Image (tube, rainbow, N blue to C red):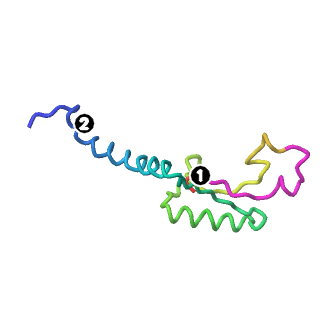
Amino acid sequence: MNRSRRDFLLLAGAPLLALSAAPQAGHALAAEKGRVVRWAMLVDTRRLDEQAIERMARACHKAHNVPDIPGRQEVKWLWGAEVRHAFPESCHSALPHALQTRAIPLLCNHC
């Protein structure tokens, strides 16, 4: 069998193309019927502290099999930081100090 690389890629890529188009077709059908569903997630940061955020991060990393790579190449899907460090361009003197120093979870957008 003498197949070219191009033939192989066409043969291997066709099922992937079909699978990637299927979810989009479902969204188009739902939009036509006026039933578009959008999801959101709300985190009440007033109820969180650094220990709670650490537990959330451990649970997330365990559930999604995030590797533990120490150092500069650390992989983080969820981690905690103070508001002033997470959003330095948005923090100014008008924000209360308690809000600037509040620990918040930073999400990776998979959630």
Circle 1: residue type: Cys
- Residue at 65% from the left image edge and 56% from the top image edge: 79
Quadrant in the picture for the C terminus: bottom right
Residue 81, position as x, y percentages in the image? 72, 54
Is 21 one of the magenta-colored residues?
no
- Tell me the quarter of the picture where residue 40 sits: bottom right
Task: Tell me the mark number nearer the camera, choosing from 2 and 1.
Answer: 2
Residue segment shown in magenta? 92-107
Is 94 one of the magenta-colored residues?
yes
Which residue carries the number 2 mark?
10
Eyeballing the image, is 79 above or below 28?
Answer: below
Residue 60: which disc? none
- Residue at 38% from the left image edge and 46% from the top image edge: 20
Eyeballing the image, is 10 above or below 87?
Answer: above
- Residue at 55% from the left image edge and 47% from the top image edge: 73
Spot the residue most to the left: 1
Residue 27, position as x, y percentages in the image? 46, 49
Residue 25, position as x, y percentages in the image? 40, 47
Which residue carries the number 1 mark?
108
